[in-house]
Amino acid sequence: MLSHFRAAGSNISVTDQFGDIASLVASDVKQTNGLVYAVDKVLSPGAPDTSHEIHASRIFAGPNEYPPTNFAAYGILAFKSKVTIYDQERQKMLCEAFVNAVLPSSSLVVPTAAQMVTVWPMDSAEHAKAATKANITRTCDEALQDYGLAVSQKAVRDAVASGVAVDGDGPFLIAWAPPTQIGKPGAVVLKADLSTVTEYKMASDIMHRWVVEIENRPELWRSGTFDRSLIATAREWADHYGSLIFSVVGVK
């Protein structure tokens, strides 16, 4: 049954109760007892309502570009120290997992207002731009060499102020919901602790799951509204990776 009927000259546009649409001519339509029917026509699915969706993305940002503006929400991939010859291989592995699992903000077709962006901090805007423009095979070399440690350490202090334990070597994926509560006691904070991650497959899997957790909870990022399913999610992560990987602070 059709729920919407519009005619413009001999062209007719119809929409059914499911939002599916079709463009018809007069001979395709029959009207009986006040109801309008499309005769022998298959309606195409209408455009889905994406106005409430949140998409995960990433950016490289200099000190004056953090926190990022115009995004629905943001998080950070926070290392406790810059790369050294002793941990270079592991840090590059984690970076590769991040950049290959999370799409760059500029590649998405949705506006930044519909994105929850995870920031890789850089020590200058120029270096952030260089990492953004670098060939994917060189991205992590640029990103690690000029990592923004000062911003990262500030994010870790803000997480601690909200009651988050950051005792491991890291790095840590940290996000606040909503972001206006950053650094405040009682804020809702999601944290993925990658201290024990030493293999690419596990790192990649965690990064992909981070994307899923972001995109499955648009209301969490827009307003801080959420249900207690986050607790169940933390248990699922614990069953899969161990109890220290994923945690939620501030859930009432």
Image (cartoon, rainbow, N blue to C red):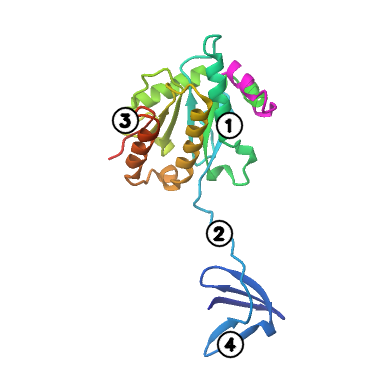
Residue 16, image x and y in percent? Answer: 55, 73
Residue type indicated by callout 3: Pro
Name the N-terminal-most of marks 3 and 1: 1
Mark sitting earlier along the chain (2/4): 4
* Dot 2 alpha-carbon crowd within 10 angstroms: few under 14, some 14 to 19, many 20 or more: few
Q: CA distance from mark 3 to mark 1?
A: 27 Å
Is residue 139 shown in magenta? yes
Report, in whole angstroms, how far the alpha carbon at label 2 lies from the one at label 3: 38 Å
Query: Mark 2 or mark 3: which is in front?
Result: 2
Disc 2 target residue: 48
Q: Residues within 10 Å of mark 3 (few under 14, many from 20)?
A: some
Q: Nearer the viewer, residue 154 or 239?
A: 239
Q: Are marks 4 and 1 in contact (CB under 8 Å)?
A: no
Whole-angstrom CA distance, mark 4 to mark 3, is: 63 Å
Residue 247, position as x, y percentages in the image: 36, 32
The picture places residue 57, in percent across and down from the top left corner, at 55, 37
Question: Which amino acid type is marked by label 2?
Answer: Pro
Q: Nearer the viewer, mark 1 or mark 2?
A: 2
* Residue 185 disc label: 3
Can you tell which of label 4 and label 1 is closer to the viewer? Answer: 4
User: Which corner quadrant holds the C terminus?
Assistant: top left
Q: Is residue 155 left or right of residue 86?
A: left
Callout 4: 10 Å neighbours few (<14), some, many (20+)? few
Q: Which residue is mark 1?
A: 59
Q: Residue at x 53, y 58 (%)?
A: 49
The residue range painted magenta reads 132-147
